[in-house]
Image (cartoon, rainbow, N blue to C red):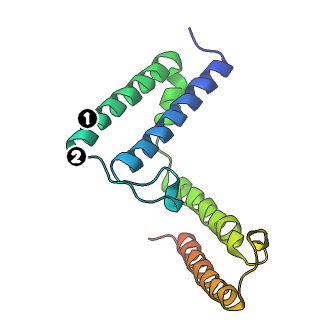
Amino acid sequence: MALNVGWTNHLLSTRSVLRATIAKIERIAAAGQSPSGSAGTPLTPLPEAEWHRLRQGLDALLAEADALVAALAPEEAARSAQIQPVEATRYHLSLLLRELDQNVLADLEPKRGARYGRLALEDEAHLADALARMRRRVRELQDGQDRKPG
């Protein structure tokens, strides 16, 4: 018996969150990345054997979730397993690069950071120069995305 749309969407969403959480666990356990991202101090990765045991358990957990989706929502499982063309990858990268420029880096503009307090003129100049360089790099990356190889 097929699941209703609400349960199908909930099941797919839960599997997606499970995958994202497993990716976070991997970044912490294998790469030593702080759970708070770059703002946190680096962690010591787990010893290889310990990480391997944890990874096996996480892989089994994900396999169970995939099997559940395949059993209860087979059409959605087949559709979600289809690999999208490279154009879809480029599209999503383009969105993220735009987000870097318009949101992440823009938040470093001195006028937007006034809530953090005043900057000394030399610090403001240093920040403005660094921000201009970073934005230039993002634009170069965006331009590279516009020029597809081949």
Q: Position of residue 61 (x, y in %)?
A: 39, 27
Which residue is found at the position 40% from the left and 23% from the top? 64
Which residue is found at the position 59% from the left and 31% from the top? 13
Name the residue at the top extreme: 1
Q: Position of residue 81 (x, y in %)?
A: 46, 35
Question: How many neighbours does mark 1 have within 10 angstroms: few (below 14), some (14-19), or many (20 or more)?
Answer: few
In the image, 144 versus 115, the foreground residue is 115
In the image, 87 versus 19, the foreground residue is 19
Q: Which residue is mark 2?
A: 48
Circle 1 — which element? helix
The part of the image, by quadrant, that contains residue 65 is top left
Q: Is residue 103 left or right of residue 140?
A: right
Q: Is residue 29 left or right of residue 41?
A: left
Name the image quarter holding the N terminus.
top right
Q: Which residue is mark 1?
A: 53
Indicate the amino acid at tag 1: Arg
Q: Is residue 64 left or right of residue 50?
A: right
Q: Is residue 121 above or below residue 82?
A: below
Circle 2 — which element? helix
Indicate the amino acid at tag 2: Glu
